[in-house]
Structure formats: C-alpha cells, structure tokens
Image: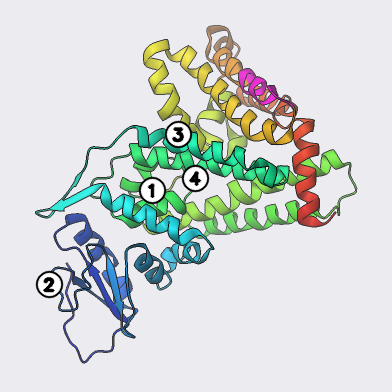
Amino acid sequence: MITDTTDNTATTAGTIFYDAECSFCIAWANRVTPSFARRGFRLSPLQTSEHSLGLAEMAVQFSDGRQLGGADAVVALSRYVWWLKPFWLLGKTPGALPILRAAYRRIAANRGCTAGACITRRRSRSLDWLPLIVLPAVAIALRNIFVDWIFMWLLAFSLFSAFKWLTWRRADRSGVHPLRSLAYLFAWPGMDAQGFIWKAADERVSTADWVAAVAKTLLGAIVFWTAATGALTVTPSARAWIGMGGAILFLHFGLFQLAALGYRSVGINAESMMRRPLFATSLADFWGNRWNTAFHTLSHDLTFRPLARRLGAIWATFSVFIISGLVHDLVISLPAHGGYGLPTLYFAVQGAAVLFERSRPGRAIGLHRGWRGRAFMLTVTAIPAYWLFHPYFINNIILPMQRAIGGA
C-alpha cells in the first residue's frame, strides 16, 4: 500500500508522479516505492498532486527543479536502482532516447485506464508484422555502406528487433506497466513475451549459478580475444571456428545467462537460453529444450502451431527446420556473398533426423534416449556444421571481423 509522504520538512531527491486512475500503475507504484524511498524519492498521484506537471504520463520532479515525463523520466530514474540501470545506460547511448520515447508512447497508446482498470484497445494485425518486412529491407538497402561483417550484425539485429516486436504485440499486455514491456523489448534476448511479462520466477538463484555464469563470460571473452589477436598458432579456419566458439560461450552461455539470473533474482520469469545442451539425450531434446530456447519458442508459436493445424505435426516439424534454415541463410550466406542454400540444407538434415528419431525404426534402435540418443545428437549436429558455417562465411565474415577487432 502506498503511503504518500507529505512531510515537507524532509529532504527528498524528488517526487515521482503516477496515474492513480490506472490499476496497474498503482500496483507498479506499490512495488517500487521501497526502492525509491530509500533513495529519497516520494510517490504521489498525478491527479491530486499540488505539483501537477500537466502530463498524462508518468513524471518526475527533482528537488533541483528539473521536470521530466515519459521515457525521459524512466531513464533518469533508472540510474538510482541497480536492476533498472540497463535502461539508464541504454538511454545514454546515442540515438537510443528517441526510440525509447516512441516505444513509451506506443505502449501508453495501447491501453485506456478508466475506473481503476486498464483496457487493451483493438489493434491492427498489420502492425505486428510490418517491422519484419521494413527493418530487414532497410538493412539490406544499407549493405553497401558497411563492410560485410558489420552488415551481417545489422541484418541479424534487424530480424531480432522485428521478432521482438512481433512477440510483444501478440502477448497479453493488459495491465502491464511500460517498464516491464521496455525490459522485454530492450534488455532481454528471449522471445517468450507472455512468460517474461506475466510469470513469476519459480526457482531461486544460487551463488553457484552466478559464479558459473561469470566464469563462462570471462572464459568466452578470453577465447574470442585470443583467437581474434592471432595468438593461436593454428590455421585461419581453425582460428575462426575457435573464435566463434568463444563468442557463443561469451554471449549465450555468459552474458545472456547473467541477464536471466538478474531478472530471476527480482522475481521475473527469464528462462535460460542455453540449458546444458551437451546433456541432451536426443536430437529432439537438443533442438526443442536445450539449444537457444529463444528461437525454439519463437518458431513454435509462429510456425509450428499454425502449420500443425493444417499440415499435421510431421510436416509442421520439418517446415520449422526449413524456415530456420532460410533465416540462417539470409543472415549467414547473404553477407558472405556465397554458400547459398547450405545453412538450409543443414537444418533440413536436422529436421529429417528428428523425424527419423521419432519414427518406429528410430525408437526401436534407441535414438530417442540414453547414450544412443546422445551419440546420434552429437553426430547429426556436429558433422554437417561445415554446411551451416561454410567457407564463404568463415573467409568473408569471421576472419575479417577477427582482424578488425584483434588487429591480427
């Protein structure tokens, strides 16, 4: 329950104004009051405050007279609470603040708050998919401005941003505070918008979890940097593969895991993207439950379920792998100027192998469990990896990126 401090003799850092006619705004204010109160802020309703800023959005009035509203207020306040500091850092990034302002306005426009309840307005489905067309098209139009490896990252980020928007738009956001949505859109790599926004963390974070994530982050950085600087006396191709392994360890097993632990420690359901993939006991277990769960969640919701209703589970499963291959072809082969179709072929093999593993002959020889399943998984994923990260990608993307970063 919010207790509005009215003692004007107390020294305060400022006043945070919230909408007292919106139920989730009240719930958010109740949640953050202790954190901001410890830092000298008080919370007060916009509707009754004697210091009304004339804004129909969250606002803050600092003790030095500064007044901010909307995304500007969110960024300014984020520096005072450790788990909100990613927003503050993001807001300080050149070009990020206008995007945050637009996102905040868009989020606020999608709800109407009356009589203590927030009602989600009817939305246009075309806005869900529009960024998936526009953002990659813009990235491709700019390809001649950048070197190939930077273009690859730009194209990958455009697809990532479009998918983030799509999953967020399709989630139930009624009664969700903009901060939760902004955290999902800009400070979390996962694709389960519904789970991130609504579910509470169901497991405790241990010290061992933190230590392991930090160790993987540091080890990945060391491996990547060692490969990039040319300190390893190996062939260029081997150096590229080692560097890619270090990058995956640094990002997916390290930084992304640290982010998941941080969110879970404050009660947000942020599931690990990598769940001990080498312990998978089948190929289906590897792709469905352990490796890059963000992409699995995305493909299951957007591709498998709609296709399964029309084509059945078998063809829907194979189609998911083909679509995954086409996406990887776009991000890998297009910037590399070659190797077209090889990533798609790799994922076609994965899809066919999963279906065989689930078939009666596959189950009869034990490919779906135990050591046979693990051996089958390692064989099918590792040996054809040469098609996924083909020589065009190694020579035209990875090695130039390593030379640019490490100076080797």
- Real-space CA distance between mark 3 and mark 1, rounded to the nearest whole angstrom: 14 Å
Q: What residue is at 61 percent from the left and 22 percent from the top?
A: 373
Give the mark nearest the N terminus, 3 or 4.
4
Amino acid of disc 2: Thr
Residue at the farthest bottom position = 9
Mark toward the start of the polypeptide (3 vs 1): 1
**Secondary structure mainly formed by the magenta segment:** helix
Residue 95 x %, y %: 51, 60
Q: Which mark is residue 48?
A: 2
- Tell me which segment is drawn in magenta: 339-349
The quarter of the displayed image where residue 48 is located: bottom left
Q: In the image, is 187 to the left or to the right of 110?
A: right
Residue receiving disc 1 = 269
Foreground: disc 4 or disc 2? 2
Question: Tags 4 and 2 in contact by the CB under 8 Å rule?
Answer: no
Image coordinates of residue 283 in percent, x first then y, are 58, 24
**Colouring method of the image:** rainbow
Residue 199 point in image, percent of width and height? 32, 46
N-terminal label among 4 and 2: 2
Circle 4 residue: 272
Residue at image point 85% right, 52% down: 230
Q: CA distance from mark 1 to mark 2?
A: 35 Å
The quadrant the N terminus occupies is bottom left
Res 339 seen here: yes
Specify few, some or many for label 3: CA neighbours under 10 Å numbering under 14, 14-19, or 20 or more.
Answer: some
